[in-house]
Amino acid sequence: MSFWEKVKSDVQKGLKEGASKAKEKAEELVVEGKKLYGSFDLKRQVHNEFYELGGIMYELIKNGTEKTEDIKALGIVQKIKELEIKITAADKK
């Protein structure tokens, strides 16, 4: 085998091996990406449920249906009430 044929053969072999390794890595990344997305999607669902729960609790506390003495919760409810007044005023303009 001539020098050129050996170089050509080695390059082709290297390209095939490189492509094979790249394919394996891509498949690993796809699997890992699916795992991460699955976890992220579940966390997003939990976030959405907390968001809904917060809205429900705000309405209950605001209307006096739900009683709480938690200072932090009452402070947040007060901030939302103030924002609600500002939004109502802005919507009238």
Image (cartoon, rainbow, N blue to C red):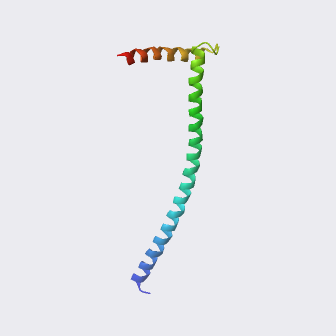
Q: Is residue 43 above or below residue 35?
A: above
Q: Quadrant of residue 75?
A: top right
Q: Position of residue 60 (x, y in %)?
A: 60, 18
What's the residue at 39%, 82% (across, down)?
4
Residue 63 in the image: above or below residue 56 = above
In the picture as drawn, the residue positioned furthest to the front comes out as: 92
Q: Residue lying furthest left in this view? A: 93
Residue 33 lies, with reference to residue 71, above or below; the image says below
Residue occupying image coordinates x 44% and y 81%: 6
- Work out which residue is located at the far bottom of the displayed protein and give it: 1
Q: Residue at x 55, y 46 (%)?
A: 37
Answer with left or right where residue 11 lies relative to residue 24: left
Does residue 83 lie above or below 4 as drawn? above
Q: Nearer the viewer, residue 19 or 90?
A: 90
* Residue 5: image location, x then y, percent: 41, 83
Quadrant assignment for the N terminus? bottom left
Q: Nearer the viewer, residue 41 or 17?
A: 41
Q: Position of residue 70 (x, y in %)?
A: 63, 15
Q: What number of labels is visible?
A: 0
Residue at 58 percent of width and 37 percent of height: 45
The quarter of the image holding the C terminus is: top left
Taking the image as shown, residue 61 lies to the left or right of residue 2, namely: right
Q: Nearer the viewer, residue 1 or 40?
A: 40
Q: Is 20 in front, or is 33?
A: 33
Residue 59 x, y percent position in the rendering: 57, 19
